[in-house]
Image (cartoon, rainbow, N blue to C red):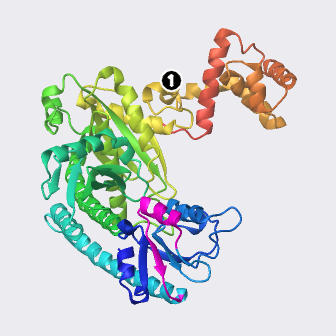
Amino acid sequence: MLTVQDVLKRSLFSKTRVVAGSNGLQRQVKWTHVLEIPFFDDTIFQGGELILSTGFGFEWKDSSNTSFLFNLIERNASCLCIELGHYFEEIPKEMIEMANAYNFPIIIFEKFVNFVEITQDIHSFIINAHHEKLVELDSISREFHSLSLTTHGLSNILKLLQQKTEASIIYLPLEGTPFSIPSLNNDFMEQILQIIYKDRDKWNYRITNDPPFEWKMLNRTILLQPVGAMDQIWAYLVMVLDRKSDEFDSLLLDRASLAVSQDLLRKYYLDEKRLRLESTWLNDLIYGRINNEEQAWGFTSLTSKRNSIRYRIVIIEIEEVFQPSSLSLSDEENESAIYHYSLKIRSEFEKYSFTPYITSKRNQIIVLAIDLGTTNSSKERILKVVDTLLFVRVGESSQIRIGIGRQYQLLLDAHNSFREAQLVLNYRTFSTSSFYEDLGIYRLIQLIQHNQDTASFIEDYLSPLIYYDKEYGTELLLTLAKYFEFDRSKKLTAQDLYIVRQTLYHRLEKIKMILNFDFEAPENRLNVEIALKTYQFTQQGGVSSK
């Protein structure tokens, strides 16, 4: 970091004198700027500028020496360097007093200097220093990456970070015991942890590429960087400095957190692969290849609680992402993507008091979710899981659909819950819910749709309308379906069909005439509605589950 004190040691500043603000010589110099105008704003200031001036524009119109100086101080300039001569013979007393009050250095050139030479000299130094830092950052980043592949990757990464910054490093996992390198005073450590726990929600909303969070505490600078991947936070990495932080500290903390994330992700993948051994057991369960309840529960660690807990089968279907295309994924990439998403699935279910067991088949991930929470909140909690998983990005053009079977206690009923979850996916065109128990009449339709009596039932109640629409190109069947959908509200039906209410009245009379019975009579209405829903399902390619 280049400071005002460092600049004064350079040869072009050998004939200078600090006349005010000597307590601010440690201010950082990030750039130089020649300024001769009295009015300026943030558009030309980034902070940290060394200002070169002859004083030509200090007093112009409504400007004054002190207003010019205060404007610089407000915009966090580093210092003001004035060439004495035609415009300024000496620095006014009021400027010296203001500069001393704000510890803002004022430096005077007692002889003529070339501002271009000064600018070139300082800019060359800054650019070279930046280049050296980038080279060093790249070297340390490679070390971090290499360490993430070692047996004790986490501790080695943190030790290297501590050595390079000479700061205290705290590692705070969300699940586990925090520790620091080197060890911090217990009281101070406790204070930091209380602040982090209190504002945890704030840390979790960090946007990618954002700088670390920073705050001051007991004359120390605290930097915090969340560690994680896949929209999940696994830990916090905290740097405690006895000085002001600089950009290099933030970059090192960011690179270290990325290396720690890679180390943790690799371990989570290995854990997930081990957990996927449960896939064989779950496949046997949902396809009915296990016929003994004791044997079924033997795979889990919840045998002692089996009489008090319930479960559901959840099917998560990912469309398109694994389909062949010009950019099709390799088998290894497919497997990696499934593992990646499985980590998120497992995490979300566990967050809401479910123990998940997971398997997959083609583009479906199948979860047996054992509920360890309270029964009265079960559906509400699983809905929260569903809402989160529906918006997880799995691929560039992927679409996620979810089906959930009914709740059961006996594991030997898992094949029933699996069948129900699959039916929900088949009927998602007609139902807005992911739950089998919310399918309503479609639970009955799937039982009878391939029965010959079903076709006769549809023909008896709807065939005159179906033939009429085909012959004359009308939409009487659609009109009737919408009329029932909106609970016989003529206003809402007309609005949805984009027709005037008088036209709707005419259509309804026409429908009664063609059917030759009053479809609004209670018994007729029930039969017509069932016939309509069954016909719609069969026409849109409904699939029966066997």
Q: Which residue is mark 1?
A: 440
Q: What quarter of the picture does the N terminus occupy?
A: bottom left
In magenta, the rendered stretch is 91-114
Q: Quadrant of the C terminus?
A: top left
Residue 207, image x, y percentages: 44, 54
- The residue that appears at 36% across and 52% down in the rendered structure is 341
- Residue 254's spot in the image, x, y percent? 33, 63
Q: Is residue 459 visible?
A: yes
Q: Position of residue 338 (x, y in %)?
A: 35, 55
Q: Look at the picture and state if 110 lies above or below 489.
A: below
Camera sees residue 404: no
> Is 221 placed left or right of 56 in the picture?
left
Camera-nearest residue between 124 and 474 = 124
Q: Residue at x 25, y 47 (%)?
A: 279
Residue drawn at point x = 16 percent, y = 46 percent? 177
Counting other residues with Cα less than 10 Å from the Cα at mark 1, is it few (<14), some (14-19), or many (20 or more)? few
Q: Quadrant of residue 304?
A: top left
The x, y position of residue 423, in whole percent, is: 45, 35
- Depth check, front residue: 143 or 184: 184
Q: In screen coordinates, is 359 left or right of 511?
A: left
